Amino acid sequence: MRKVHAFRHHGLRVMYQHLPGPLTAIALSVRAGARFDGRHPGLAHMAEHMLFQGTESLDQLTLNRRAAELGGEHNADTGYENISLTFEVFNEDLADALALLAEQFYRSAVTEERFRKERRVVVDEIRGRLDDPFERVARSAWGRFFRGSLAHPVSGTIGSVRLMQSRDVSAFIRRYFTHAQSVLAVVGGISLSETRAAVRRHFSGHRSGTEVLPPRARFAAMGDLRLRGSGGQGYVTKLMAVPPTVRDIVAVGMALDIVGADPDSRLFQEVRERLGLGYEVSASLDWGPDWGVAFVSATAARGAVDRLRRAVDDTCRRAAVEGFAPDEVARARKKLRYRYASLAESRFDRALALAEGTLSGFPLPERIERLVSRMPAAEIQAAWTRVLGGRSLTAVLAG
């Protein structure tokens, strides 16, 4: 196992891991995701967009040309917990890449002209997602399942984005883009000494700040949600609350592999092979430090949507009652171990896991891999049974 080095620079947490090769990946994660939007749903997502619209010394074109000159992958993403800026470059370009990320972190400029243009872009992005029925039922279910800071989509709504002003985004960046809210992770062929020197050089701005916590996660409705207007197709999405402990997250993740969407899984075999109801099945898990949600979704013809809903519920319930066969557990264990091992070998994924995991308190991939390999089947079934007997909401979208 490759050692992870951690140090602080003016309050900024820095994680470093050597991974031999010509490339280095950087992830700068800020605990300023959609949970921090306040009265402007979508504000964090808009802030992410504005990070690429120019700074005090670089206009939008110069900023993006500079990133292209470094030849690397330069991007960002917003979730409910974090905004993460990422960059993967040749080892010799690490210092220049950190300089560009620092420019965005400390000196992003939210001008009225650029903000209005980007606000139109985000509105179009939301409108495009609303045309997707799967997205519509997922957003509706999520908004009913939670209340408060988690109840809205990460991107906000068309109405909430149109009400934003440039000053709202500027204030958001000033408040949350501080060392106390952030973790910088560097993974690759660059040396630790070179990393330390580059961080000292470029991340010495006066943004130490103090830690700001989001409003606590709150759940809302349970039961059923019926939606209309899907054309000829029906959609079912089931949301289940998961206790936000590491062992519960891992155990339910293994159960989802057995129940869920892969061709060897129970739901896939039930919906597509035995009943011939639909062509799309999915299962996933999302979480934060104080919340967790498991998702199971499937589609069928509009007239078969009630049969589909029963198939989803019955398949999930049978797994809790009957338990998991040893061969199912073995396959799930192998698949999850493979995914975590693959993540550990990817510079980009590794840097992102280091940064976001440090912010959230989630363990490193190798620890999760060990946990997966040793977790008893009885614990997996018990976790799934608790989830099935707990808070849940099933949304159905039909014609």
Image: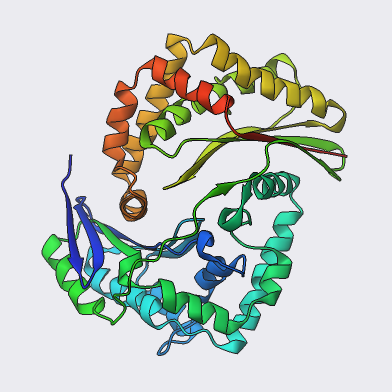
Residue 227: where, in percent of width, then height?
A: 81, 42
- Residue at 27% across, 37% down: 366
In the image, farthest residue toward the left? 193
**Residue 328 visible in rendering:** yes
Q: Residue 268 at what x, y percent from top left?
A: 63, 23
Is 110 placed above or below 140 here? Answer: below
The answer to which quarter of the image holds residue 66 is bottom left
Question: Which of the colour schemes (rainbow, by chain, secondary structure, one colour) is used?
Answer: rainbow
- Count every numbered label the image shows and give the total: 0
**Residue 51 in view, yes or no:** no
Q: Is residue 237 left or right of residue 249?
A: right
For the point 44% across and 11% down, the residue is 327
Quadrant assignment, res 141:
top right
Residue 279 lies left or right of residue 349; in this view the side is right
Q: Quadrant of residue 107?
A: bottom left
Q: Position of residue 373 (x, y in %)?
A: 31, 24
Nearest the camera: 330 or 251?
251
Compared across the picture, whether 343 is left or right of 172 comes to left
Quarter of the picture containing the N terminus is top left
Write the residue at 46% across / 60% down: 214
